[in-house]
């Protein structure tokens, strides 16, 4: 049973809709907490995505991220630096799409305890770099030029889009696991 089901009881469609809406607000706010690196900012989005996946479960977590992406695609300023659907044409597009899988993977560990959540959170954070790096590599390959200040070579792309974020992503994965597992402990203690 997920944290939200433990806290809210039987999950009705209305409860799930409210969770999705609330989750998209959390994602939009977390995206605005940004440290301006170039070409992509460091945000609290990965922390929010993992926390939502751990708390909601795989399907509802992925659906929440998908709803957030749809809000942005429809013009809402929900992405980093108050960006909207235009972000799907920028350097963060691969990461945005990868967040769906990240939430799903986190949700698979939602009922397995702190160690499993932390481990899956670290794995999901690492796997996020596959679509995150594939996007600028693909754009660079199609254009045959450096893109968003990064050279075509993989080491340069890794440096620009991944290296400076690895430690922060690991910390956010462990903190998200601690937050949600702590929520489980608190609910069980008060039950």
Image (tube, rainbow, N blue to C red):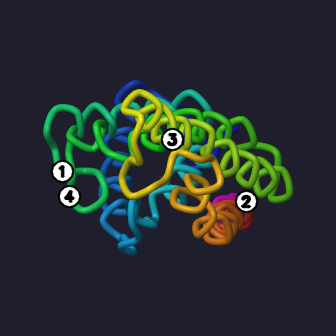
Q: Name the residue under label 1.
A: 77
Comes first in the chain, label 3 or label 2? 3
Q: Mark 3 points at which residue?
A: 99
Range of magenta residues: 180-184
Comes first in the chain, label 3 or label 4? 4
Q: In this view, does 125 lie to the left or right of 144?
A: right
* Tag nearer the camera, 1 or 2: 1
Q: Is residue 109 left or right of residue 143?
A: right
* Tag nearer the camera, 2 or 4: 4
Q: Is mark 4 on a helix, strand or loop?
A: helix
The answer to which quarter of the image holds residue 176 is: bottom right
The answer to which quarter of the image holds residue 115 is: bottom right
80 or 37: which is nearer to us?
A: 37
In space, the residues marked 1 and 3 are separated at their CA atoms by 17 Å
In which quadrant will I find the N terminus? top right
Q: Does the magenta stretch include residue 26?
A: no
Comes first in the chain, label 2 or label 4? 4
70 or 148: which is nearer to us?
A: 148
* Tag nearer the camera, 3 or 2: 3
């Amino acid at each position: 049973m997920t944290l939200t089901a433990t806290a809210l009881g039987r999950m009705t469609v209305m409860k799930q809709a409210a969770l999705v809406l609330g989750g998209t607000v959390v994602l939009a706010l977390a995206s605005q907490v940004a440290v301006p690196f170039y070409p992509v900012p460091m945000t609290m989005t990965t922390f929010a995505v993992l926390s939502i996946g751990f708390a909601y479960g795989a399907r509802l977590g992925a659906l929440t991220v998908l709803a957030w992406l749809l809000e942005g695609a429809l013009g809402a300023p929900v992405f980093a630096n108050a960006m909207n659907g235009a972000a799907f044409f920028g350097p963060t597009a691969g990461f945005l799409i990868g967040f769906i899988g990240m939430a799903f993977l986190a949700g698979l560990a939602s009922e397995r305890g702190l160690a499993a959540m932390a481990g899956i959170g670290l794995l999901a954070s690492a796997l996020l770099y596959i679509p995150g790096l594939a996007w600028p590599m693909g754009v660079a390959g199609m254009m045959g030029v450096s893109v968003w200040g990064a050279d075509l070579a993989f080491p340069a792309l890794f440096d620009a889009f991944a290296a400076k974020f690895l430690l922060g992503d690991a910390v956010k994965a462990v903190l998200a696991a601690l937050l949600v597992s702590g929520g489980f402990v608190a609910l069980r203690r008060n039950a």
